[in-house]
Amino acid sequence: MTPAVDQIFVNIKHWAVFHSPAAMRPAVSVLLSIVPILAVFPGLFAVTTVLERKGLARMQNRYGPNRVGPFGFLQPLADGLKSLTKEDIVPTGADRLTHFLAPLLLVMTAFLEYAVIPIGRNMTVANLDAGVVLFFAASAAMELSIFMAGWSSRNKYSMLGAMRAVAQMISYEAPLILSSIAVVMTAGSLSTVTIVEKQAGYWGVWPYHWYVFTPWGLAGFILFMICATAESNRSPFDLPEGESEIIAGYFTEYSGFKFALFFLGEYLGMFAISGLAITLFLGGWAAPLSFLTFIPSWIWFFAKLLALIAVFIWVRGTLPRLRMDQLMNFAWKFMLPMTLVVILSAGIWRFLPQGVARWLICAVPIAILYILLGRSLMGGRKLEKRTYRFAE
Amino acid sequence: MSVPFLILAAITIAAAVAAMTLRKLVHCALALAVCLVGLAGLYLDLGAEFVGLAQVLVYVGAVVILIVFAILLTRSDEHQSHGSSRILSGVAVSACVFGVLAWAVVTSGTKESPNAMLPQGAMKQIGVALMQRYVLPLEIVGLLLTAALIGAVVIAMEEKQNTK
Amino acid sequence: MTPLNGCLLISALLFSIGLGGALTRRSAILVLIGIELMLNAANLNFIAFWRYGPHPEAMTGVLFVIFSIAIAAAEAAVGLALIVSIYRHAKTTDLSRLDSMKG
């Protein structure tokens, strides 16, 4: 463990606050907590857009952006300049104030979510007693901003996209919150910092206390990530912006920088929810193996974040888009019962003694429900190898 | 009364007035959202952290969205102008109510105990209280919410069965 | 003015605004919004009395507000479902036109 490197940002902040005039200290402290977040995550957004486009291109057997800068890595700069210099068009029938406020609200709420995510040891902007609730409250406000965008554009496609997005986000918010309830219950705290602390410690080299290494935690993590994909409106749950049906969904009528803000807000939401998944299930900033603890905690957080982003990109490149009725059926008939049984399993886990028996007892109800629900939702159909009629 | 408290109170009241006076129903709903967030801010300022956040989660995330959906499903903008006598009497009644309430608040000798809050473990206290002393109300609320969920679905679905 | 009185005055004002709106507006949805405002005014009172009352450690006010929020959500869901269903029958949500029960 190298505490100096691990705590370098914390120490710099303490030093800066200590050396500023006494009256300015609270302001300096707040600024030094917020500004790094405002700088790092949009930077990560820029990197991710390139990685995503290149990754998708690789999966689809093409090149992807490779013109601007080395390997196309300056593409986001070019994109940013383009969106800044483009004309900002507001439709005549639009509700101007709401139309203007919607992207701002989206980005603001997305940034608000980062307030409770522990990025490293002692690196949380606000260690709230009810941190997880703050996160979900902010993402609830995000839904409203999407509705505002769709409604104020005075466009059928925008409206349809917004209705789809809001319906989808509300439906998937229920299992999202329920699957994190299992962790909150086991950790006995709503504070993200405490949840990370409860997962500390190793068994040999293995991070034994991570919640993902329990039967309910594994199921909960998978359910959480499915809901996270739906919450951030990404493929295969990207019906709100399904371009073959409703152009670009709720931001059809946005152009220039406001469009870029929507794009930013969407990715920030994805990073934030991945950050919460890391905090709740993957041990937060802790190293995955005990002999790797010499690497600073914040590097581990970002490594895990990038890994989850890679999963998002992978899923986007692999799965086709769902239909609206499939989406809703999946949320209410599969996800919700599964998360409820995950909570039950977490409760059983809490009161059983350690051992293999506990593992089995907790895994069995989840597996049974999974098989039953899967059978009933498939409706007797069998998955077979797809036969292509035209593309031989 | 701290400065943030007064600002939040002003925002809340202004948004409430907007929610009740604006023409377009969606604007009213959005003003209601601002008002409820302002109230959540007031709760946070008063030290009720969990309630403030739950307020945003439930009201902005669910109630306002529901209202907005209902507005869109019913296309119910008020077209004609209101009768002025109706408005006058309504405003007069509410002004009287406010007068009486304000008089009662100002004249009654409310004694405040200046004791400090217990920020430590407030969340834990809420949880313990919910699970021990208030477990029966909690169960009843759960039952009520389930009943409301089913009831709302049944009421809103009613028409569909006839068409099938 | 003491903080408690300030809170109570704000909540009284909020209540009157909600009441005024519920009495004057004709759209059923706006009446529901007015009722929500009144309910929230009551919630603010609970929090204020909890904060400045003699026994904040008992958390009574906070818990009452938590239950009240849950019940408000149920109320909004059922109320709006009723409004949607009424709209299907009468093609309007204007309360002054929904007078078919009048003799």
Image: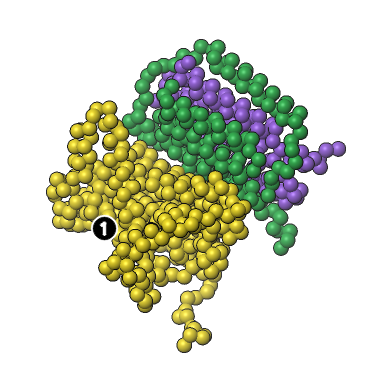
Chain colours: A yellow, B green, C purple
Which residue is denoted by mark 1 in the rendering?
A303
- Choose between A194 and A368: the one closer to the eye: A194
Which residue shows up at 21% across the image and 37% down it? A16
Q: Secondary structure at mark 1?
A: helix
Residue C64 appearing in the image? no
| Image quarter of residue C99 | top right
- Left or right for A35, reference A180: left
Residue A51 % position (x, y): 33, 65
| Chain that bears disc 1 | A
- Choose between C72 and A55: the one closer to the eye: A55
The residue under label 1 is which amino acid type?
Ala
Residue A205 appearing in the image? yes
| Image quarter of residue A72 | bottom left
Residue A173 % position (x, y): 47, 52
Which residue shows up at 39% across the image and 25% down it? C57
- Left or right for A307, reference A14: right
Label 1 neighbour load within 10 Å: few <14, some 14-19, many 20+: some
Question: Relative to A42, does residue C68 appear above or below in the rendering?
Answer: above
- Left or right for B89, reference A52: right
